[in-house]
């Protein structure tokens, strides 16, 4: 360190009665605090312990170790921190005679072989004079000795040299490498130089980055500007593609398919009817239907009419759907015929003055048949609202996220660019309509001439069926959440050489949750020629904001358990910032913030929450630019990719769905017997997260079955806890808040009913499959699959295993209807005996009875043999 900086630090210390040791320690503590995010830092230092004159001439080892605990807050000035350090050091020296070993013995910290007790970082300033050893006829000099081990995680030793400072760093190579230590020293030098020049500056704002680092992090790694048609809306891009390739297949779902011309014309016709019903810019239309071709037509029609759509998932409870419709202010709800009753219930439950118009899609299509013509005049512009998606809310109310057309188009363009999607591609649409990934899955291929393959839920939720469908349909781009990916890998492993080849699959795209390196390696072990594109994003920013292509698995010796989330996509920016909004250096954790074209408007009718999450962007030159605060914790790697480290709030992801436990807690609190509750997510040991509700009931315990049934009327299936733990009271910390770390570990292996053993061979087989999937020793034949922690993804495993072991074809919905071993075994026996053939015949007769005379005549004519 330069002479001028040292002289400045000496002057700062002199002003508050502190030594150079104290001043240097203050700077070191600032760096350690900002690296670790801790407000209090413990540093060890050795003391000679010869403070009395009569000890100076004695031979012997008097050295002791002091633990100096320093509190750091971003608002304190460096001068103030030096004074605080002075008091700590002086207080420590007053008790320097207490042996460190005795201190450890009295405090009894938890002892671990991985690190030393009480402190893991040591700081030494060798400022005592070292006279040269003089021996007759012998030349001596000091030689540093490396014993090959590190006594602590990190030791910084400094000593004066030519008016400045020099020193060495000893570190654990299991925790640090040379590059990281070199960066840390540069950051210490930067902090100390700034502190010497501006000692009254708050320590939280002392610059730690060098000029080159700051430029690299803020600008070079965010230089993502690229061409994207953000001046147009997505339906305009689809219409242009329809004009260019009218006869190419645009969308398929099962046996139904539409060409680009047919898709565009169907959407045009429906759009004209919607325009007549008042749909236009900034008008929200609720869409209650299954994912199929008609859903895509309706979506495009809403866009063409100038409106925005709000997906309403048919599987969600009517009460929750009603709350969404009421909050969104939808003036119109479109419903498939199959959900006419559900839509009627939803709308009827709203006040008459806020009740939207309900239209069945079949009636609208019938009214649109004669509405021929070209594309409607442009009604929406890129700055208009494109869609509204509801995510779980911490206050108990779902949040309505608003995304504009420009952000939507930019994300589609990034997906097309990074996946290389062309007219030859078949992109799978398998995400739920209420999940943000569904948007690009529906639309990306349609803007560049490819085909959208809509995969029904019964296949999308069944790993074995999804593998087979991917092969059969020639799907080239498939996106799944890691929990489904894990099941697909398991199925492929089980099938061995008989596994589907997936010859057409060009990309596997994990999404929705952290991708574990171990799972990534397993994927490449079964499909080495299919690369992965790891994705990261938030609904609030038009879905994904970061991509990381993986052309090969992570090395087996890579210690990182989670695959990095990558770097920002085109026209987006990603920052890792500390609590004072300052950029964090490489390798230093901070909060991830997202900026760029895709940042959404915010939360509908919630300006306070919007203002707290969508913040002014101080690093953008665009007026009015905002940053989205993700509340994810991450850090930069040296190559510019971001590593995901976790959350700084209670939000969790289960099977790719964002869940705010507060919303579940609010719903539980509505039960008259629930006095207090807290919901957390636990790993079940098989790579799945399960929601666990801890419940304090009054006057007494309430069964999990009762609470689960209560929640199913209010929340979607993926938000209903699988385990309920009764407590007499919730553990609280000193601040009176729930201490989540003190909650007892739930028992994820036992059920809630009296055990009843299987009674038939089929019940034995079903129970065995359940036990394997749910990781339990035994299963009662009267226990509900979902009460035991089952969910749709695990249900797909049950169906797949029963298909192999019993050679019976079970739709996934059967397990939702027959959710006990006894009822499912009875259904299996019925299907094995062929009883369902009568039902098939009945269904066929009913279908014929619904046909018109013209349809019957056409069918009969088609079946007539040709004349000889």
Image (cartoon, helix red, strand yellow):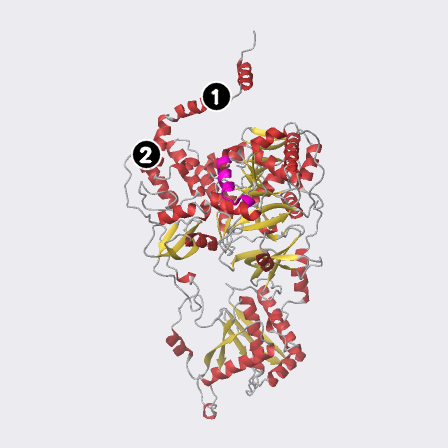
Q: Residue at x 67, y 77 (%)?
A: 197
Name the outermost residue toward the top: 868
Q: Secondary structure at mark 2?
A: helix
In x, y percent, where is residue 556? 50, 52
Q: What segment carries the magenta color?
A: 339-354
Q: Residue at x 70, y 36 (%)?
A: 376
Q: Which mark is residue 343?
A: none
- Lower sequence index among marks 1 and 2: 2
Determine if the magenta segment contains residue 191: no
Determine if the magenta segment contains residue 351: yes
Is 377 positioned to the left or the right of 458 in the image? right
Residue highlighted by disc 2: 762
In x, y percent, where is residue 686? 42, 49
The nearer-to-camera label among 1 and 2 is: 1
Quarter-of-image position of residue 55: bottom left
Q: Indicate whether 533 appears above or below 736.
A: above
Q: How many C-alpha atoms fall within 10 Å of the one at disc 1: few (<14), some, or many (≥20)?
A: few
Q: Indicate whether 749 appears above or below 207.
A: above
Is residue 515 among what the camera can see?
A: yes
Spatial separation of the CA atoms under disc 1 and disc 2: 37 Å
In x, y percent, where is residue 626? 65, 57
Is 786 positioned to the left or the right of 88 in the image? left
């Amino acid at each position: 360190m330069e002479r001028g900086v040292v002289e400045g630090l000496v002057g700062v210390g002199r002003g508050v009665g502190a030594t150079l040791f104290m001043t240097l320690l203050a700077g070191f503590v600032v760096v350690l605090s900002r690296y670790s995010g801790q407000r209090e830092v413990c540093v060890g230092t050795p003391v000679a312990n010869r403070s009395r004159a009569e000890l100076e001439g004695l031979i012997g080892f008097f050295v002791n170790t002091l633990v100096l605990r320093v509190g750091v807050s971003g608002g304190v000035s460096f001068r103030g921190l030096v004074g605080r350090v002075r008091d700590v050091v002086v207080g420590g020296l007053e008790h320097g005679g207490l042996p460190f070993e005795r201190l450890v013995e009295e405090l009894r910290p938890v002892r671990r072989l991985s690190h030393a007790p009480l402190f893991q970082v040591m700081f030494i300033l060798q400022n005592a004079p070292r006279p040269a050893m003089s021996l007759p006829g012998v030349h001596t000099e000091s030689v540093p000795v490396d014993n090959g081990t590190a006594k602590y995680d990190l030791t910084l030793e400094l000593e004066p040299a030519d008016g400045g400072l020099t020193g060495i760093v000893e570190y654990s190579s299991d925790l640090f490498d040379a590059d990281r230590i070199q960066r840390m020293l540069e950051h210490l030098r930067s902090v100390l130089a700034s502190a010497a020049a501006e000692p009254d500056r708050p320590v939280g704002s002392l610059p730690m980055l060098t000029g080159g680092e700051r430029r690299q992090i803020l600008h070079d790694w965010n230089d993502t500007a690229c061409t994207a048609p953000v001046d147009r809306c997505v339906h305009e891009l689809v219409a242009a593609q329809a004009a260019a390739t009218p006869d190419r297949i645009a969308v398929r779902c099962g046996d139904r398919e539409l060409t680009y011309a047919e898709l565009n014309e169907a959407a045009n016709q429906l759009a004209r009817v919607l325009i007549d019903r008042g749909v236009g810019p900034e008008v929200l239309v609720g869409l209650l239907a299954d994912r199929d071709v008609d859903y895509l037509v309706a979506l495009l029609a809403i866009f063409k009419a100038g409106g925005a759509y709000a997906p309403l998932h048919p599987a969600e409870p009517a009460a929750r759907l009603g709350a969404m419709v009421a909050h969104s202010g939808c003036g119109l709800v479109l419903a498939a015929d199959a959900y006419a009753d559900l839509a009627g219930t939803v709308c009827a439950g709203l006040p008459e003055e806020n009740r939207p118009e309900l239209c069945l899609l079949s009636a609208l299509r019938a009214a649109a048949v004669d509405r021929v013509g070209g594309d409607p005049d442009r009604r929406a512009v890129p700055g208009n609202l494109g869609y509204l998606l509801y995510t779980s809310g911490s206050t108990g109310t779902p949040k309505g996220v608003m995304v504009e057309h420009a952000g939507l188009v930019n994300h589609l363009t990034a997906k097309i660019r990074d996946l290389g999607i062309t007219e030859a591609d078949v992109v799978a649409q398998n995400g739920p309509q209420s999940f943000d990934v569904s948007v690009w899955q529906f639309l990306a291929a349609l803007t560049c001439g490819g085909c959208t393959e809509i995969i029904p839920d019964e296949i999308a939720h069944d790993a074995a069926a999804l593998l087979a469908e991917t092969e059969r349909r020639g799907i080239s781009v498939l996106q799944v959440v890691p929990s489904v990916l894990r099941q697909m890998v398991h199925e492929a492993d089980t099938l061995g050489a008989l596994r589907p080849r997936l010859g057409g699959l060009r990309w596997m795209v994990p999404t929705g949750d952290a991708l574990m390196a171990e799972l990534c390696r397993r994927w490449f072990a079964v499909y080495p020629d299919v690369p992965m594109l790891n994705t990261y994003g938030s609904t609030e920013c038009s879905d994904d904001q970061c991509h990381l292509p993986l052309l090969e698995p992570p090395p087996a010796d890579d210690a990182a358990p989670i695959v990095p989330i990558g770097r920002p996509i085109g026209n987006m920016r990603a920052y890792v910032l500390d609590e004072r909004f300052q950029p964090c250096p490489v390798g230093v954790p901070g909060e991830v913030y997202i900026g760029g074209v895709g940042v959404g408007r915010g939360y509908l009718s919630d300006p306070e929450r919007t203002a707290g999450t969508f913040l002014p962007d101080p690093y953008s030159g665009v007026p009015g630019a905002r940053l989205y605060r993700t509340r994810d914790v991450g850090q930069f790697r040296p190559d510019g990719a971001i590593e995901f480290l976790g959350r700084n709030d209670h939000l969790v992801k289960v099977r790719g769905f964002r869940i705010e436990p507060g919303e579940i807690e609010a719903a539980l609190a509505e039960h008259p017997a629930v006095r207090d509750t807290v919901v957390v997510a636990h790993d079940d040991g098989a790579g799945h997260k399960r929601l666990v509700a801890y419940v304090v009931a009054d006057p007494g315990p309430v069964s999990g079955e009762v609470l689960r049934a209560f929640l199913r009327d209010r929340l979607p299936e993926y938000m209903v806890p699988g385990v309920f733990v009764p407590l007499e009271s919730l553990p609280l910390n000193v601040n009176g808040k729930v201490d989540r770390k003190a909650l007892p570990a739930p028992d994820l292996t036992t059920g809630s009913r009296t055990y009843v053993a299987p009674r038939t061979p089929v019940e034995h087989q079903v129970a065995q499959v359940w036990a394997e999937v749910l990781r339990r020793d035994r299963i009662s034949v009267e226990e509900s699959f979902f009460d035991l922690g089952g969910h749709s993804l695990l249900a797909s495993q049950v169906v797949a295993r029963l298909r192999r072991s019993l050679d019976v074809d079970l739709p996934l919905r059967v397990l939702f209807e027959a959710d006990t071993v006894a009822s499912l075994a009875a259904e299996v026996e019925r299907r094995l005996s062929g009883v369902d053939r009568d039902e098939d015949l009945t269904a066929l007769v009913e279908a014929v009875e619904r046909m018109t005379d013209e349809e019957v005549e056409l069918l009969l004519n088609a079946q007539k043999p040709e004349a000889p």
